[in-house]
Amino acid sequence: MGSIEQQVECREKAEYANVNWDELGFALTKTDYMYVMNFSGDEDDFSQGILTRFGNIELCPSSGILNYGQGLFEGLKAYRKEDEGILLFRPVENALRMRMGADRMCMPSPTIEQFIDAVKKTVLANKRWVPPHGRGALYIRPLLMGTSPNLGVKPASEYTFLIYASPVGNYHKGDMNLFVEDKVYRAAPGGTGGVKSVTNYSPIYKALTQAKAKGFSDVLFLDALTGKNIEEGSAFNIFILKGNVISTPTAYGTILPGITRKSVIEIALTLGYQVEERTVPIEEVFDAEEVFCSGTAMVIKSVASITYQGKRIEYKVGTETVAQKLYATLTRIQTGLIEDKMGWTIEI
Ligand code: COI
């Protein structure tokens, strides 16, 4: 037994899970609890949700999610403040986006209140997994899925809303070198590119795997209609900078309305940049001064290079970039280092 101070320090340390926080990338670390709430066709609301130990779930082999991909996910983060408090970043936006996606996918969805309550309970139950201040975040992954048996092509009659969480660090370590894919398209007009359907992701694995095999970090997709305009990456929105103007493709229909994307736009405007949401032809990427990505997982990351049809363009990265300025403001709000004048964070 050491001094009282050492014992107190030990108790404080014991509040954290045994994780090497500085080694975290973006991979699952299993945490203690998950939250589960069911919807059966007989009731017109979700059941009372419960916290249960994190673990495998049972699904009918014929469930809607397994057979026809009737499912959505969300992603948001909880951050540790310097004083050990915990902040959620814009959870209402995720709740709204899930509701929008559920409508597109013919699914019932939790109310905003049910969603926020479930997120808070999940984070508090897994509090010891929220990384220390400045050393990562707890990534919260809400899922909504059709669970009833479904052999025919039609919406399920039963659904599960589930939230699990994992501490995470950087999504991409090192420089971000993007490959512009001009044969595979992520989303088509009228499709589900603008909602967070689980079906938007694995169809791009082949393009991503091939790009990674050639040494690229990630893939940027073009619009399916003309193949001439940039849209988004495998898991991020994209911005280009020229002079005082920051441009990003309009998040309409084929592009996911990212919450970090929205936050970047709002921060950039307060910092005096002009922001344009519009069609962005691939040619404009060639003479951009900076390119950067945004996403909940990615946060904000400068792009070091873009390669399109064999042509490689390099961009400014590092501490003197506009991307870094936006990143600093965003992450200071997220971690409680500066006053949240936007009203984006919720302390739990
Ligand atoms: C997020 O940023 O939350 C995402 O959805 C990316 C995820 C697919 C890794």
Image (cartoon, grey):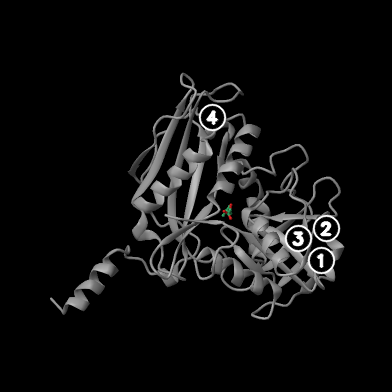
Image coordinates for residue 133, horizontal then vertical, percent: 43, 69
Judging by the rendered image, the residue that carries numbered circle 2 is 280
Between disc 3 and disc 2, the foreground one is 2
Spatial separation of the CA atoms under disc 1 and disc 2: 8 Å
Q: Which residue is mark 1?
A: 285
> Between marks 3 and 2, how big is the CA–CA gap?
14 Å
Q: Residue at x 41, y 38 (%)?
A: 36
Check the image and report above or below for 251 versus 285.
above
Q: Is residue 295 above or below residue 302?
A: above
Q: Is residue 164 left or right of residue 277?
A: left
Q: Any mark on residue 64, and which? A: 4
Tell which circle, 3 or 4, labels the residue nearer the N-terminal end: 4
* Quadrant of the rendered image containing residue 298: bottom right
3 and 2 marks in contact (CB < 8 Å): no
Label 1 within 8 A of ligand 1 by Cβ: no
**Label 3: which residue?**
180
Disc 3 beta carbon < 8 A from ligand 1? no
Q: Secondary structure at mark 4?
A: helix
Q: Nearer the viewer, residue 117 or 175?
A: 117
Query: Disc 4 marks which amino acid?
Result: Gly
* Amino acid bearing label 1: Val
**Crowdedness near tag 2: few (<14), some (14–19) or many (≥20) residues, C-alpha within 10 Å:** many
Q: Are marks 3 and 1 in contact (CB under 8 Å)?
A: yes
Amino acid at pointer 3? Val
In-front residue for pair 169/335: 335
CB under 8 Å between discs 3 and 4: no
Mark 2 or mark 4, earlier in chain? 4
**Quadrant that contains the N terminus:** bottom left
Q: Residues within 10 Å of mark 3 (few under 14, many from 20)?
A: many
